[in-house]
Image (cartoon, grey):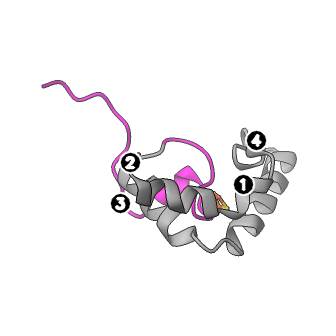
Amino acid sequence: MTSRTKDWRTQGSCTVVDPELFFPAGNTSRALSQAARAKAVCSRCPVALECLHWAVRCGEPSGIWGGLTEHERSRLGGRHRTHRPG
Ligand code: SF4
């Protein structure tokens, strides 16, 4: 992790929130409510853009990063973590 990467992570609004909030499971009403609450935190985060860029660039496979779910990020055209031989 570079110092710049570390820097944005330490400035995120989620640093004072339970990390589990950002990993809703499934599409139940409870999970959707959880995702909405996580996105609300992201919406007022000063490093949301850096976070989103990182998640897309790294192909983060799960969770809400930069205010977007994995499904929403996949529509941005980011690569996903897959094993590619060679
Ligand atoms: S955008 Fe959301 S997940 Fe990313 S650092 Fe900010 S609060 Fe955390």
- Ligand 1 has an atom within 8 Å of the beta carbon of the residue at disc 1: yes
Sooner in the amino-acid sequence: mark 3 or mark 2: 2
* Disc 4: which residue: 20
Prevailing SS of the magenta stretch: loop
Residue 64: x and y, percent? 63, 53
Query: Does label 4 or label 2 sit earlier along the sequence?
Result: 4
Q: Nearer the viewer, residue 21 or 5?
A: 5
Spatial separation of the CA atoms under disc 3 and disc 2 = 12 Å
In front: label 4 or label 1: 1
Query: Is 62 inside the magenta-drawn segment?
Result: yes
Q: Is mark 4 within 8 Å of ligand 1?
A: no
Q: Residues within 10 Å of mark 4 (few under 14, many from 20)?
A: few
Question: Outermost residue, front direction?
Answer: 3
Quadrant of the image for the N terminus? top left
Amino acid type at circle 1 is Thr
Q: Which residue is labeled 1 in the image? A: 15
Mark yes or no: residue 50 visible.
Answer: yes
**What residue is rendered at 62% in x and 74% in y?**
46
Q: Position of residue 17 (x, y in %)?
A: 80, 53
Q: Residues within 10 Å of mark 2 (few under 14, many from 20)?
A: few
User: Which of the labelled discs sits on residue 77, or is there none?
Assistant: 3
Element marked by disc 2: helix
Dot placed on the residue nearer the N-terminal end, 4 or 1: 1
Q: Label 4 vs label 3: CA separation? A: 26 Å
